Image (cartoon, helix red, strand yellow):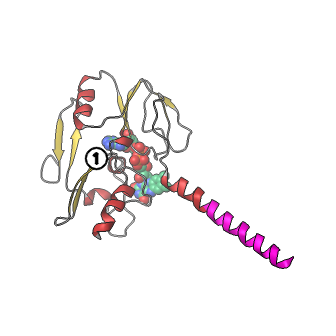
Amino acid sequence: VRRSLRRSAAATAALAVLWFGYCAARVVREPAAAAGDSLVVNDVTGLNPVTVARVLAPATVAEIEEAVRTHPGPIAIGGGRYSMGGQTASDGALHFDLRGFNRILDLDTARRTITVQAGARWRQLQEYLDPHDLSVMLMQTYSDFTVGGSLSVNSHGRYVGGGPVILSVASFRIVLPDGSLVEASPARNP
Ligand SMILES: Cc1cc2nc3c(=O)[nH]c(=O)nc-3n(C[C@H](O)[C@H](O)[C@H](O)COP(=O)(O)OP(=O)(O)OC[C@H]3O[C@@H](n4cnc5c(N)ncnc54)[C@H](O)[C@@H]3O)c2cc1C
């Protein structure tokens, strides 16, 4: 009896560990909210529902330029939606859902630079870089933020003396309110 009790306790413990691992993996790996066609945009807290007029999930920079140029009213941008004060959406505005704008465009291993779309998550970069024996130079304490969302808030890294994340950025392209595309770096359009 004691042996079978021990076995069933071990089996229960193994199941509990597996279940915990499964739940933890879901929490860590799944985005704050799944992409969908709802006009209600929320953040990771679930406390800030905002009804927008239209959601655009662009695949190209040209689509973003065109929408910014032609949309007459306010525009708000959502990255990973991990900020917690409703900053990613505005009532009745056009909302850019950038979670699918997340391609890795280029890796230059000699220069150790990577080019990504703004909706790429740090996790994606890590997984892409790791087989090359490289890693992200500066990032925050969590991997599911997007690169654009991190830079937009001028996030700090987690490394003492490393400074803010922007110090690891060679340049980025930004669409201005008139729809024009500008390259910005410490040397050009700083
Ligand atoms: C668990 C946890 C740990 C954290 N750790 C750190 C940390 O170590 N250091 C730190 O500095 N911060 C930290 N933060 C804050 C975090 O860096 C910010 O909330 C960050 O903005 C989250 O990125 P996101 O992709 O979810 O952005 P979102 O929440 O989607 O957007 C944040 C802001 O950026 C704007 N935005 C998003 N994408 C773009 C884009 N492509 N172009 C222009 N604007 C855009 C949005 O409109 C919004 O105003 C932490 C937050 C959490 C929840």
Q: Secondary structure at mark 1?
A: loop
Left or right of 60: which side holds 30? right
Q: Position of residue 9 (x, y in %)?
A: 76, 71
Q: Quadrant of residue 20?
A: bottom right
Residue 185 image position (x, y, % from top left): 17, 51
Q: Which residue is mark 1?
A: 117
Q: Residue 133 placed where, x, y %?
A: 29, 71
Between residue 140 and residue 19, name the one nearer to us: 19
Is 92 on the left or on the right of 130, as rendered?
right
Residue 17 lies, with reference to residue 68, above or below; the image says below
Q: Quadrant of the N terminus?
A: bottom right
> Which is nearer the eye, 137 or 25?
25
Q: Residue at x 33, y 69 (%)?
A: 161
> Which residues, given as a range, are shown in magenta?
1-20
Task: Where is residue 186? Give x, y as percent.
Answer: 16, 54
In the rendered view, would you say 44 is above or below 106? Answer: above
